[in-house]
Image (cartoon, rainbow, N blue to C red):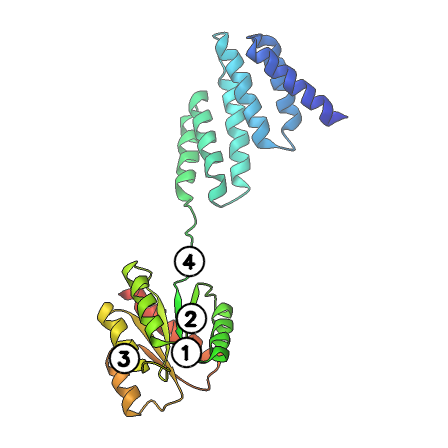
Amino acid sequence: MADKKKKLDYDLAFTHFQNNQNISAYNLFIDLAEKYKKIDSIKAGLLYVLAGECKSRQNKDNRDEALQAGQLFLNFAKKENNYSVKSAYLCAAKCFLKSGNYDKAKKAFQESKKLQAPLTETSRPVVIVDDSKSMIIKLQNYLKKLGYDNLLSFETGQNAIKESQKLIKSSKNPIFLLDMGLPDIEGDVVAEKILEENPKSQIILITADEKTSKRVNKTIRSGVIAFIQKPFTINDLKDAMNTAESEYSIL
């Protein structure tokens, strides 16, 4: 019942406001502001702003209403410490300026400047090149647990080269997980083609071969940043991915 009465008073206040019946509108806005103070400080602040506008239309001093509104916006902003309350600080600053409280306005504005929009972190694409479907699934599961969700997979070297060139040209900066034994092209050839497209490409070799084998050793020397020997654990993959991310951060 109380909420219904508030809505009726709210609608009536705006009717008076639209019809320039400023005294009646002012009284209703002030009454509503007092009722909302403890339950919704933003709405109460806005009601004080509207009440102040009613006074302004009558060429009356509205600094008290501006001060009340500013304090309510400030109280709301202080409850949180994140970017979502930046606008509340700015509203408070503007109201304090109108009320002639320049020090409070300055402080509220300075507080708003401290709040920065959060960075949206997006994981880099990870390209899996392996002819074993079970290995692709294993890598995908591990990568998702490590926070990577932009995953692509290819079972042949030709497809991997073709699509990887597109990613590199679009500045996606993917990390490549490359198996050495592919059905159409050897992994060292795929690595060579990717590095020709962008020498800074980050390739992690995944193979059953020993690191000291001639083929693996040659591919590593060509610019591969990490090596994982099968069978491997999620921690082995994590270490290799961390190496890639650390190197990428200083490129």
Q: Which mark is residue 189?
A: 3
Report if the CB atoms under discs 1 and 2 are less than 8 Å apart: yes
Q: Nearer the viewer, residue 242 or 191?
A: 191
Mark closer to the chain start, 1 or 3: 1
Which numbered mark, 3 or 4, is in the foreground of this view? 3
Q: Position of residue 58 (x, y in %)?
A: 50, 7
Report if the CB atoms under discs 1 and 4 are less than 8 Å apart: no
Mark closer to the chain start, 3 or 4: 4
Q: Which residue is mark 1?
A: 130
Measure the C-alpha gap from mark 2 to mark 3: 18 Å
Regarding mark 3 in the picture, which secondary structure is present there? helix
Q: Position of residue 112 (x, y in %)?
A: 42, 38
The correct choice, above or below, for 79 with respect to 43 in the image is: below
Regarding mark 4 in the picture, which secondary structure is present there? loop
Mark closer to the chain start, 2 or 3: 2
User: Residue sitting at 44 percent across and 30 percent down?
Assistant: 93
Regarding mark 2 in the picture, which secondary structure is present there? strand
User: Residue sitting at 49 percent across and 9 percent down?
Assistant: 57
Which numbered mark, 1 or 4, is in the foreground of this view? 1
- Circle 3: is it few (<14), some (14-19), or many (20+) Cα within 10 Å? some
Mark closer to the chain start, 2 or 4: 4
Measure the C-alpha gap from mark 1 to mark 3: 14 Å
Measure the C-alpha gap from mark 1 to mark 4: 25 Å
Q: Which mark is residue 68?
A: none
Q: Nearer the viewer, residue 55 or 231?
A: 231
Regarding mark 1 in the picture, which secondary structure is present there? loop
Task: Count the marks.
Answer: 4
Q: Which residue is mark 4?
A: 122
Q: Which residue is mark 2?
A: 153
For the N terminus, the image quarter is top right
- Circle 1: is it few (<14), some (14-19), or many (20+) Cα within 10 Å? many
